[in-house]
Image: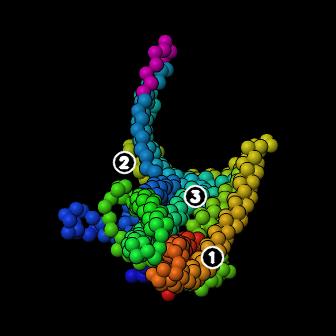
Amino acid sequence: MSARFFGKAALSCPLLLILLLFPAGSDGADRLRLTLEESLKIALEKNLQIRIATLSREAVKPEIRRAESIFHPSLGVSFTAAGDNPASDLNAVSRSESQTATGFISQQLPTGGLLLLSTDIARDRDKTDTPPTVASSDLTVSIVQPLLRGGRVYVATRPIRDAESDVRIEEARLRGAVLRVVAATRRAYYNVNLAENVIEVIKTAIKRDEALIEASEALLKAGLVTTRDVISAQVSLTKDSERLVTAEAELESARNALFDVLGLPIGTEAELLDREVRFEPVPLELEQWIDTAVKERPEVLELEQGLAKSALNIRVARNSVLPQVDLTGSYSRGQTSTTVARAFGLRGDAWSAGLVFSIPLGNVAARAGLTRAEIEHMRLEEQLLQQKRVVELEVRGAEIKLRRSLSRIAALGKILEHAKNLNEVAKERFARGMATNLDITNAQEDILNAETDLLEAMVDYNTGLAELEAALARPLPAR
């Protein structure tokens, strides 16, 4: 697998990645042994930002099903019974009772209409009538279809489209979180690597200081140098020892930052296996990088989804200012008889059709809603332009960092070479008693500074590559 780990699978399914733990070390203590690639796997699995972003995406997914449920049919049934037995001094008194059962199925249509299928079964008994019992049944299909306001597919399905857009927005945010965590993991790993290598460089410098002290003391006994040379070597040792303490503190801070981005307990015992600090230059393709970043960055994709959602809001808002013109229609079949069984013949029929028209005077609320939707759309357009500028600046900044690091690496390599040559010359002159050890201490300090600066420049270059990949939202081609 490439060292540049994150790909489409990692971006879309970070929680499927496995936490790789190695067995305990020979000292009996549990200890993680981490390569850079394994650190990326752990971060994608354990990092809290990614886990929060993943849960946010999962939380909005059910909204799609909930929005789609408006087009699920509704089934209902009712039963009523009534009786009338009035008290009256008149001879003609109607004593009656009735029972009615009603069943219906309603269906919301994607066109904004409502379809209703209903059936009624009724039994009426009036003791003063002949025959005293009358049964009836009917089956009715009715529809209400808006022709203007509310009568468009995009109006009826807007909740579904909004829910789908919200899911895509959360997916873009998750992808952005993954990119940031990958870059932060690389940066933290490189910083720990840098601190460990700087400590090794300083320890090597301390050994040089100790050797210089021994040589100075020997030459002092031979009368070839003065006490000042011994003290100068001891001062150099003291300075490098102080730098070692500082470097060890920086290593501890770098480890804490690494464990934080990995989502592991702070203070976890771990050993980094990729100890060597190295870099592989990449061709600088600024214009191509900018074009890629503007197309691929999750922040841009998120705003584009927001614009699409806003455009739909404007269409719906424009529809809401139209007058209400609804087409209504119904058709039913029914029959009335002296028995319930004969009433199921449904030999009669009836139909109706009509139009309903209404308009709010002034329609202030709908027009205000349209104005707000249009302004919000313009705001999102400006925000998208601003985000693209931010992305371009990030890519340009990463490219500048790469160029600067390359120049520093080349210059520091020459400085280190010159410092080593000067150190050899100074040691030779000092051994002959032809000079003080000041030239040696200066050369050794130059060596230490050049070595640490070179390590920092190489780590800066690798960090710049990680930041560039995050800015591009995709890995650079394998080299």
Q: Residue furthest right?
A: 362
Labelled disc at residue 205: none
Do residues under tags 3 and 2 come within 8 Å of each other at their CB atoms?
A: no
Which tag is nearer the camera, tag 1 or tag 3?
Answer: 1
Measured from the top left, where is residue 146 in percent x and y?
66, 54
Q: Amino acid at mark 2?
A: Ala
Q: Quadrant of residue 461?
A: bottom right
Question: Closest to the observer: 330 or 70?
Answer: 70
Kindly identify which residue carries mark 2: 341
Label whose residue precedes the other's in the sequence (1 or 2):
2
Q: CA distance from mark 1 to mark 3?
A: 46 Å
Identify the colour scheme used: rainbow
Say left or right for 328 vs 64.
right
Q: Which residues are magenta?
A: 83-91
- Overall secondary structure of the magenta section: loop
Question: Closest to the observer: 139 or 128?
Answer: 139
Q: Residue at x 47, y 83 (%)?
A: 432
Kindly state the secondary structure of the residue where label 3 is placed.
Answer: helix
Kindly identify which residue carries mark 3: 162
Q: Amino acid at mark 1?
A: Arg
Labelled disc at residue 404: 1
Bin the neighbour count of mark 1 within 10 Å (Cα to Cα): few under 14, some 14-19, many 20 and up: some
Q: Residue at x 49, y 12 (%)?
A: 89
Q: Quadrant of residue 315?
A: bottom right
Q: Residue at x 42, y 72 (%)?
A: 220
